[in-house]
């Protein structure tokens, strides 16, 4: 029961059936069709154990209109006794035809007689060792005991256009035991009014908990970060500009209108005494890093520290190189933290951070370790936020110990959040969107190519190399086996090295020592290496404008947003760029439906928001939420693709309910989420 999360009475009441069995009527064998699941009743006319390859129990049942053979491959003596000749029984199972006439394999059976049930029989999700009969009794008991008084008033339901029929207890009772006259399709597709009521209540609980978290944060305090305006000085000496303005002046490019807009939104948040909780989303290559740098400059200029945490060492290194080149000439000292540092270097970095000498700290998960003590952290920036867990984000926020203040939090993602997801799982965040690419970025042409045409792809690579271009070749990460993953990348490297004589072909994978990884990336970035064979460690953050071709091997194994991220590694310069999705069908004659839908989406659009919308359609919300879901369980009943109207109603009702009926709102959240609501605060 614990494995299924069935701890409270309400958990049992909300444990809904997977499907139903109709035991409300007896079907005559003469009326039954092959393939039907039916309940029959009749007299046992023969019962014998036969050994023909397998030991089996064969029972003939005669209902007066025809006979049916009941076949059991595993059985107990007690079952054999219950099926003795002359006994009258009811059996339920799938009816099959054949040479021997009608047959049922391993049907459920019981002695005939007694009243037929008046409702469909529920079949519940279960685990090994928990039989349906026990679960049915437990659920029935939980449903009877659970406190199911309505938390939503009829007036509130009317206000948002819902009829207050089907209160929660009625809806749940019906869904556990629907009457046989119900249209089964409405139970299967969850369109029945009882289902609608349940889905609305679930979405309302989610909206309430998000709003509670947002309002609780509004009561917290954070450092006020405003650019320092120097006092005017007499004489020819010019006063220094605020640091972020110096950075803008020093950049070798102009910001786009979208970058300027989101930078202003972030600056406004930082200037308030409330902790910022903002998600910065922008398509691959839209220029999120420079927006983060401007936010860091405002923080450092106000004499506070800023930390930037990235999920991989390669991405953290890229950020470090970029930010150091922009900020160090302006006098900002930067510390670097990673899990694989030498002890001496690490001690030096920790000292710089603790003293406050390092205004900016960049690193991987190492940034949140206990030994890392900040002098005064005021801004935490988390890149590719879906890669980090709730606990990790909370750990970074706890690094400011200053009169109960919290640091401002800026989360960045290159996986755009579809609108319905932003309305539900990210409702507690303020979202800023960079919705235009910097000028000079070329659209990437995407081709879906069968692996059988690999030689043509290699010929294309040779032509690109002759033009002085560089190429990525990405191999999939095979999670079940790092050894397989390594062999795949190593074999591809050897094959390409042999096929491209005179070309330097590099290899990059997760098992390489850090120094070796850095050396390979440095050679590729500087243009000394023509082709880089890599696992997905180059998925985010790598910026080589001269790279114009990306080949993704076994593209059918990748998620849609991951394919889009990888494609974003090319098209960063002025040269026409392409992405080749190599797929292998293996022994199967064709691709699976999901893989086909992903590759089709990639070929049809470069728009990250459209990709995100299709990904939500294909795979559901998990990909976008990442570790955020470790606290906020994915919706059990509501579906963001089809229940947008219910979600909109829940969004409208949540603030009304919190303001007018706070006790009922709290009761509603506890009923649906229990202790899980705490995680939404991250």
Image (tube, rainbow, N blue to C red):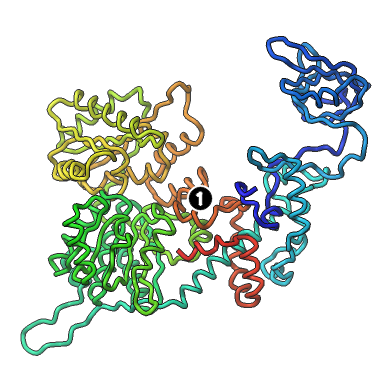
Relative to 364, 524 lies left or right:
left
Residue 257: image quadrant is: bottom left
Which residue is most to the front?
77
Does the rendering let one see residue 549? no
Q: Position of residue 85 (x, y in %)?
A: 90, 19
Q: Position of residue 312 (x, y in %)?
A: 30, 50
* Of 524 and 648, the residue lying toward us: 524
Relative to 529, 25 lies left or right:
right
- The answer to whether 137 is drawn above or below residue 477 in the figure is below
Residue 11: image quadrant is: bottom right
Which quadrant: the C terminus? bottom left
Report crowding for label 1: few under 14, some 14 to 19, many 20 or more residues within 10 A (C-alpha): many
Does the rendering let one see residue 673? yes
Residue at image location 91% in from the left, 23% down from the top: 43
Residue at image location 36% in from the left, 25% down from the top: 451
Q: Which residue is mark 1?
A: 621
């Amino acid at each position: 029961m614990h494995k299924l999360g069935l701890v409270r009475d309400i958990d049992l009441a909300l444990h809904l059936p997977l499907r139903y069995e109709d035991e409300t009527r007896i079907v005559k064998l003469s009326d039954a069709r092959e393939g039907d699941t039916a309940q029959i009743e009749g007299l046992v006319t023969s019962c014998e154990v036969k050994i023909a390859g397998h030991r089996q129990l064969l029972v003939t049942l005669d209902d007066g209109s025809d006979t049916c053979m009941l076949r059991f491959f595993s059985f107990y003596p007690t079952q054999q006794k219950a099926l003795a000749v002359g006994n009258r029984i009811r059996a339920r199972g799938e009816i099959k035809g054949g040479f021997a006439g009608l047959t049922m394999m391993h049907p459920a059976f019981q002695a005939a007689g007694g009243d037929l049930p008046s409702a469909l029989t529920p079949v519940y999700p279960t685990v090994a060792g928990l039989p349906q009969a026990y679960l049915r009794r437990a659920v029935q008991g939980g449903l009877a005991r659970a406190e199911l008084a309505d938390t939503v008033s009829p007036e509130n339901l009317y206000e948002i256009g819902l009829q207050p029929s089907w209160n929660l207890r009625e809806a749940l009772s019906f869904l556990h035991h629907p009457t046989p006259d119900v249209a089964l399709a409405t139970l299967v597709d969850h369109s029945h009014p009882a289902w609608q009521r349940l889905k609305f209540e679930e979405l309302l609980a989610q909206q309430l908990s998000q709003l509670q978290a947002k309002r609780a944060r509004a009561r917290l305090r954070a450092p006020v970060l405003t650019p320092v305006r120097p006092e005017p000085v007499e004489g020819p000496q010019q006063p220094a500009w605020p640091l972020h303005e110096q950075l803008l002046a020093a950049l070798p490019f102009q910001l786009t209108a979208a970058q300027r807009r989101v930078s202003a939104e972030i600056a406004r948040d930082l200037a308030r005494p409330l902790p910022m909780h903002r998600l910065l989303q922008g398509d691959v290559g839209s220029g999120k890093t420079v927006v983060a740098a401007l936010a860091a400059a405002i923080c450092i200029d106000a004499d506070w520290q800023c930390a930037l945490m990235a999920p991989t060492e390669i991405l953290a290194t890229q950020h470090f190189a970029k930010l150091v080149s922009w900020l160090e000439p302006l006098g900002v000292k930067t510390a670097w933290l990673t899990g694989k540092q030498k002890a001496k270097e690490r001690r030096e970095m920790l000292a710089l951070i603790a003293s406050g000498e390092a205004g900016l700290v960049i690193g991987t998960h190492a940034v949140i370790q206990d030994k890392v003590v900040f002098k005064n952290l005021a801004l935490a920036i988390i890149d590719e936020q879906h890669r980090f867990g709730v606990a990790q984000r909370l750990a970074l926020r706890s690094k400011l110990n200053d009169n109960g203040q919290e640091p401002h939090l800026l989360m960045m993602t290159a996986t755009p959040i579809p609108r319905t997801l932003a309305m539900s799982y990210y409702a507690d965040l303020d979202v800023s969107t960079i919705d235009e690419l910097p000028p000079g970025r070329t659209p990437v042409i995407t081709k879906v190519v069968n692996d059988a045409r690999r030689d043509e792809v290699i010929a294309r690579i040779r032509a690109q190399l002759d033009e002085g271009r560089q190429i990525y070749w990405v191999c999939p990460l095979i999670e079940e086996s790092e050894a397989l993953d390594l062999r795949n990348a190593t074999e591809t490297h050897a094959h390409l090295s042999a096929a491209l004589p005179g070309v330097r072909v590099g290899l990059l994978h997760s098992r390489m020592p850090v120094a070796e990884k850095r050396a390979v990336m440095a050679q590729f970035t500087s243009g000394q290496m023509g082709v880089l064979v890599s696992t997905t460690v180059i998925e985010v953050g790598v910026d080589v404008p001269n790279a114009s071709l990306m080949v993704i091997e076994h593209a059918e194994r990748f998620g849609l947003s991951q394919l889009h991220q990888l494609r974003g590694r090319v098209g960063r310069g002025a040269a026409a760029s392409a992405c080749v999705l190599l797929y292998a069908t293996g022994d199967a004659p064709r691709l699976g439906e999901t893989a086909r839908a992903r590759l089709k989406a990639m070929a049809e659009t470069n728009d990250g928001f459209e990709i995100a919308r299709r990904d939500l359609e294909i795979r559901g919300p998990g990909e976008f939420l990442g570790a955020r879901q470790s606290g906020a369980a994915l919706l059990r009943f509501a579906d963001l693709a089809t229940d947008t109207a219910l979600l909109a109603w829940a969004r409208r009702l949540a603030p009304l309910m919190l303001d007018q009926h706070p006790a009922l709102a709290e009761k509603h959240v506890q009923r649906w989420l229990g202790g899980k609501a705490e995680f939404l605060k991250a």
